[in-house]
Amino acid sequence: MDVVEKIRSAGVVGAGGAGFPTHVKVKCQAEVVIGNGAECEPLLRVDQQLMERYADDVAKGLQAVMDVTGAKRGVIALKEHYHGAVSALEKAIQGKPGISLHLMKGYYPAGDEQQIVYEVTGRVVPTGGLPLDVGAVVSNVNTLINIANALDGKPVTDKYVTVSGEVASPVTLKVPIGTPLRTLIAAAGGPASDQGYTLIIGGPAMGKLCDDWDAPVTKTTGGVLVFRSSHRLIAQKTPNTEEEIRMAKAVCCQCNMCTLMCPRNTLGLGVEPHKAMRAAAMGQGALLGDPNGVLSCCDCGICTYYACNFGLKPSRMMQNIKQGLMQAGYKPRKEVKGSPNSNLEITRLPVKRLISRMGVANYDVPAPLDERDLGVTKVIIPLQQHIGAPSVPVVSVGDRVERGALIADIPEGRLGARIHASISGNVVSVTDREIVISQSA
């Protein structure tokens, strides 16, 4: 079995959040393979600890992708202050020709794929394009570890997740895929009741609100943050389109600070949030300017959480307009509109300043890696954990499955990923959305 087939069989997808099936991504020719260990979001601690503990696997996974793609160069990009990870990786790559480290400053969003590619190659990925357009393949370091495991025949059954916020003991846990979020919250000493609290799945900037504490961990879950529902970050993330447009009309002075600080705009991609605010406030699409730039927005939220001094939500306007353009069938032009800003370095936002502005400094604490068995006896495994079509169940109610067994396959002729049992037990439910496995049934 070749490397690509081993990755496919193991159900490896982008663990950093995108969830693109990895066996499809690596089936190409590239000049450079980049391991993304910059961990874009504040408060999350997964990647830095995995690189320190499993540096050899990161290097092994990176080498495997280099071999498949024919890349002569492999680069692991991480922040320079991840001292333990840097030390471990320096040892892991010794004697491996073509593999090096690229140390990044502690700015946000350093882990954005565009930023990583530009730092490592000096090239800008075009709007509507992929890193492969400039000769690069980018994989999250957790994905590289999963690739290393796949080479040894181990499928993806677990996920590492940072649990932080309003919990007594912030921690990074290894849990079976399908574990209810409340199990992680309890393990971190979080609130016993969900009343008065709201979850953010992912990081505080790009993460999504969640009120369902029984929602399952998936292959792309990287963080579970518990906030009081009264926290202003929750209000900023709560959609209220009518109020947002009203405030844009009343308050936005077109200072364009949101555009000046936009990391994608500084790369020359023409992302202009202030024009989105203008178009929404006036109800005139012609005021948007070039709509192609909207489709290069990475939803990092700098414009909302930091740049706007009036508490407006340019990122929400960008999301709404982007969604409208896509629904209307607008196709992006593959282009780089301008040149990177010559003052790019001074426009980069230090993570600590963003943390302070967002009001989450109290939660910026260590979340040590803990791989103890939480004794999970029931999992709800979604069939849609990746970009593409939902996986197709290959088990039935009443079947006995062992941990690591295939329970859902890729639809014939479709983009997708295999899914495996994350615990041993009996299949108690199979629907077109999920498979439930229980040890007690």
Image (spheres, helix red, strand yellow):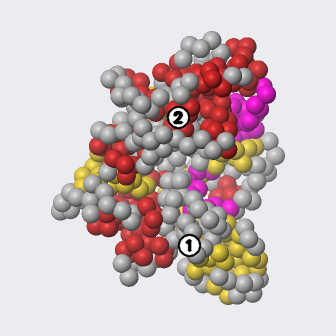
Give the residue type at disc 2.
Asn
Disc 2 target residue: 292
Is residue 330 placed above or below 358 in the rendered structure?
A: below
Q: Which residues are magenta?
A: 216-243
Disc 1 target residue: 413
Please report the residue visible at 56 percent of the width from the left and 24 percent of the height from the top.
Answer: 289
Please report the residue visible at 29 percent of the width from the left and 38 percent of the height from the top.
Answer: 122
Residue 92 x %, y %: 27, 61
In the foreground, 344 or 190? 344
Residue 104 x %, y %: 34, 39
Element under label 1?
Answer: loop
Residue 219 forms part of the magenta stretch? yes
- Picture quadrant of residue 426: bottom right
412 left or right of 250?
A: left
65 left or right of 407?
A: left
Residue 206 forms part of the magenta stretch? no
